[in-house]
Image (tube, rainbow, N blue to C red):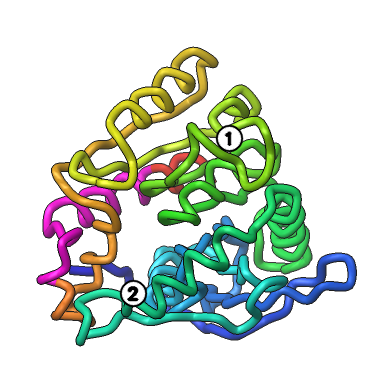
Amino acid sequence: MAQTTNIEIKTTKVKIPNNGLEIDAYLAQPANPGKFGAIIVFQEIFGVNSNIRDITELIAKQGYVAIAPAMYQRIAPGFAADFSEEHIGFSPEALQLGLQYYQQVKYQEIISDIQAAIAYLKTLLNVKEDAIGAIGFCFGGHVAYIAATLSNIKATASFYGGGITTSSYGEETPTVNRTDEIKGTIYTFFGTKDTLISQEETEQIEAELKKHQIKHRVFRYDAGHGFFAGFFVDKYPFMVQHPGYNPEAAPDAWQHVLELFQNNL
């Protein structure tokens, strides 16, 4: 069950400028005046869909400015696939498209888009200086790990990021080899029943974080891939039947996310 505060928020669709490219983004922020920490929300392979928008709004209700940039802007502008009750998750067509687009993303473009999102947040008068974090899921979990290597990112929550130890979107060096570049604090979240990410991979990530003395915590749950989607089971009741659904993992992980951002932003 989603836990929220009583903070009233406002939401809007915005454009993030990036060297002639306009990146579509979903912005949620407290309605009241003030200075707030900011958090970039990175999508799964399914685009900035209703689930990612829900997460963005949930973060804003905790007292943050939250923005979800479309990471497929160059490849498939406007793409967003929502949960399907018929398929208890995502349809085969949505999965096929998501994977197709995911395989075309390039590391340098990811970095460029993250930096553009950071620059955009810094133009907002209600964003505190030097208080930017990141959170991402699946594809976005990997992107969040990449974002953590940038000096502007003070706190990162990376959920079941696939391929961190084996790839980096067209680069020869896998992302895990950039762990020493992480400047802030990072929390990683994995499911021990995740068929897409092996225990050896999560152990390698944890070993690198320890080796380079990065401020971190690694959380492992008795759950499958995508377990945080169950956090909104009140809105999507059919997700109870989803193989990744775990009623204990998502709420517990959320409390750790709140702890991470409260202590670092």
Whether tag 2 and tag 1 are in contact, CB under 8 A, the answer is: no
Q: Residues within 10 Å of mark 2 (few under 14, many from 20)?
A: few
Identity, as a three-letter code, of the amino acid under mark 2 = Asn
- Stretch in magenta: 240-259
Would residue 230 be found to the left or right of residue 160 on screen?
left
Residue designated by label 2: 6
From mark 2 to mark 1, how far is it between C-alphas? 38 Å
Q: Is residue 190 left or right of residue 102?
A: left
From the viewer's side, name the closer residue of 153 and 10: 153
The image position of residue 203, as x and y in percent, is: 34, 24
Element under disc 2: loop
In magenta stretch: residue 248: yes
How many discs mark residues in the rendered view?
A: 2
Above or below, 82 against 39 in this view is below
Mark 2 or mark 1, which has the lower sequence index?
A: 2
Secondary structure found at label 1:
helix
Residue corresponding to mark 1 = 175
Indicate the position of residue 68 as horizontal and vertical percent values: 56, 68
Q: Could you tell me the amino acid type at mark 1?
A: Thr
Q: Residues within 10 Å of mark 1 (few under 14, many from 20)?
A: many
Judge whether 191 appears above or below 242 on screen.
above
